Amino acid sequence: MRKQSQPIFPAMAAATCLMVSGLAMAAGDAAPSGKRDRPAKVEAIEGSKVKRVTVTEKAAKRLDIQTGEVAKDGSGQLSAPYASIVYDISGGTWVYTVPQPLTFVRHSVVVQGITGEKAFLKEGPVPGTKIVTVGVAELYGAEKGVGH
């Protein structure tokens, strides 16, 4: 199996800024009081630098949030869908885990290589961990406060 590294940090950074508007627009129609429901709630996690992002059902549907899983092949190699990987401003690599429905927490990964639609991980969540594959950039933008 040939592993190939694909530097996409600049593209992901631009996509994050452009696509996060989808989450900002995911708010519901104005309530009778004139206030809008917030599509995402961002909370600090004690003892961690990452934050927990919880979205409404309406926001999740509007963003078409989809998930996959971290896998481990027979040789012990961890992998994740390439679409689940997000790059931060420093070039760090992350995935969003799904500890409970509509709740997402960023988890650091070390990408060893990429082949097609699969990212091979040197380090990451345990096999079977549910991770976001569609809506990743919007969750990252919500966590970081982009567009607010």
Image (tube, rainbow, N blue to C red):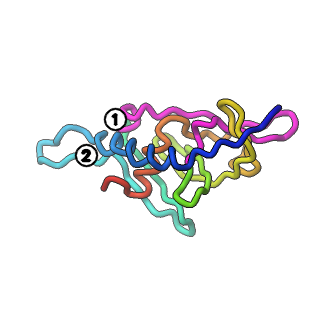
Disc 2: which residue: 37
Mark 2 Cα within 10 Å, few/some/many (few <14, many 20+)?
few
Q: Amino acid at mark 2?
A: Asp
> Number of callouts in the render?
2
Q: Is residue 101 left or right of residue 97?
A: left
Q: Is residue 1 left or right of residue 47?
A: right
Q: Is residue 126 left or right of residue 145?
A: right
Q: Position of residue 78 (x, y in %)?
A: 76, 41
Direction right: furthest residue: 75
CB-based contact (under 8 Å), mark 2 and mark 1 = yes
Residue closest to the eye, 34 or 123? 123
Q: Earlier in the sequence, mark 2 or mark 1?
A: 2
70 inside magenta stretch: yes
Mark 1 Cα within 10 Å, few/some/many (few <14, many 20+)?
few
Q: Position of residue 80 (x, y in %)?
A: 67, 38
Q: Amino acid at mark 1?
A: Lys
Q: Position of residue 126 (x, y in %)?
A: 72, 46
Q: Residue at (44%, 47%) from the top-left corner?
A: 14
Q: Position of residue 60 (x, y in %)?
A: 40, 36
Q: Residue at (36%, 32%) from the top-left corner?
A: 62
Q: Secondary structure at mark 2?
A: loop
- The disc label shown at residue 58, or none: 1
Whole-angstrom CA distance, mark 2 to mark 1, is: 10 Å
Quadrant for the C terminus in the image: bottom left
Quadrant for the N terminus in the image: top right
Stretch in magenta: 59-86
